[in-house]
Amino acid sequence: MVKAVIGILLALCTGVAAHATDEVGIEGTYRLIRSTRTIVATGQVEDAFGTDPVGYITYGKDHRMTVLIVKRDRPKPTFKTLDDAQKIRLFDSMAAYCGTYTFDGKTVWHTVDASWNEILTGTTQMRSVKKEGRRLIYTTAASPALTDGQISTSTLIWERVSDT
């Protein structure tokens, strides 16, 4: 009898834990609304990918994630005219990586398997997360910016476009 009661309680607790995880989950696809960075030394705030960035981040139920962010005003060369200078401008106007993620309701950790610049590959990127309706607001810890090495924090506002 005691074993049966313990079994029922464990089953109920497991169901409650699974339900609680679903409530704090971030599975789905989100569109980037805004991306800013604040340079710690000066307090200067700038639009990291321009005033109208293009970006998407997707979180799967399998705990895999992918993100791509680009400036909207990127050059549009043809294959015939793509030279080294254009390649550099294209590379410098984007960010992309994929990997696995863990989310505890307040913080998301991205463990990066592949990245556009190889600097992030093999690292774990931590973001503080605030949920506001269909939006996720990410804040990064102060660290050297990949573009110029200045110690900066970043804020990214994502809005859900779909569920998985």
Image: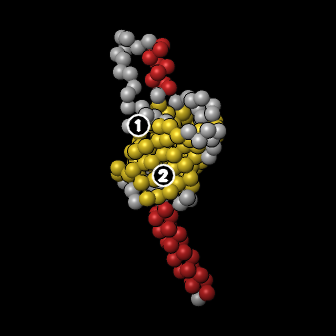
- Above or below 49: residue 77: above
Q: Amino acid at mark 2?
A: Ile
Residue 137 numbered mark, or none: 2
- Element at badge 2? strand
Closer to the chain start, of discs 1 and 2, is 1
- Residue drawn 51% across the image and 49% down it: 138
- Residue drawn 40% across the image and 60% down it: 133
Residue 51 numbered mark, or none: 1
**Quarter of the N terminus within the rendering:** bottom right
Disc 1 crowd, CA 10 A, few/some/many (<14, 14-19, 20+): some
Nearest the viewer among 141 and 37 is: 37
How far across and how far down the image is residue 158, in percent? 43, 48
How far across and how far down the image is residue 140, in percent? 58, 46
Quarter where residue 69 is shown: top left
Colour approach in the figure: secondary structure
**Is residue 11 left or right of 54 when viewed as pictured?**
right
How far across and how far down the image is residue 106, in percent? 55, 58
Disc 2 crowd, CA 10 A, few/some/many (<14, 14-19, 20+): some
Q: Is residue 66 visible?
A: no
Q: Is residue 36 visible?
A: yes
Q: Please identify the residue farthest to the bottom as the structure is shown.
A: 1
Nearest the viewer among 144 and 77 is: 144
Residue 39 numbered mark, or none: none
- Residue drawn 36% across the image and 17% down it: 77
